[in-house]
Image (spheres, rainbow, N blue to C red):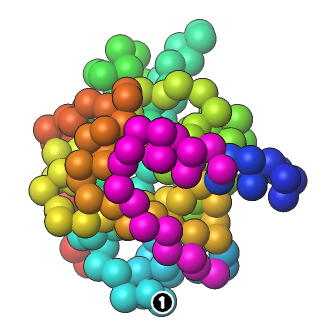
Amino acid sequence: MGTDTVWVVTDLVLSQLDALGLAYEVVPCDPDLADTAAFCEAYGYAAEDSANAIVVAGKADPAPHAMCLVLASTRLDVNKVVRKKLGTRKASFASGETTIELTGMQIGGVTPFGTTTDLPLWIDARVMEREQLIIGGGSRDRKLLVPPATLAGHPLVEVVEDLAKPAPTE
């Protein structure tokens, strides 16, 4: 993905948020620290206040896709909840290439806003209970700090109970 493409997608993200009148704050970050665990550690955000946007794919022809948003402290339930919602016998995380193809964004910067295709957005109900969340910003060099109301303002949103499970403790 070229630099020009990244900037176009980033502009789409902010343009959609602005057009919808949704609140957000841009948080710049080092692209090498864009992955959630590294970002939270480097910038002092809790995993409970960080949400990951994950593109999923159903095993069918054509393959149905959706974007899921779950707290970094949880794990997406791909094998049960996602699979059932996609209406397929099997489901998995989309590949990095498929994620770029469907969103225009690299992993580490994926956000529900400004995607290059209309993906349904399924948000785990736990996400909506947080005061503020740090989410992808459309590119690896920034994140967005948003209240749950911003996520609720997404045009294709559905809040799903138990879309994710608590992460196993080590």
Residue type highlighted by circle 1: Ala
User: Residue at (57%, 69%) from the top-left corner?
Assistant: 142
Residue 19 on the magenta span: yes
> Which of 161 and 76 lies nearest the eye of the viewer?
161
Which of the 4 quarters of the picture holds residue 140? bottom right
> Which of 113 and 38 lies nearest the eye of the viewer?
113
Q: Position of residue 6 (x, y in %)?
A: 75, 54
Is 129 drawn above or below residue 115 in the view shown? below
Q: In this rendering, would 49 be left or right of 53?
A: left
User: Residue at (21%, 36%) from the top-left corner?
Assistant: 159
Q: In this rendering, would 131 be left or right of 136?
A: left
Is 10 drawn above or below residue 87 in the view shown? below
> Which of 113 and 49 lies nearest the eye of the viewer?
113
Is 20 drawn above or below residue 155 in the view shown? below
Q: Which residues are magenta?
A: 11-30
Residue bearing mark 1: 42
Q: Position of residue 101 (x, y in %)?
A: 70, 35
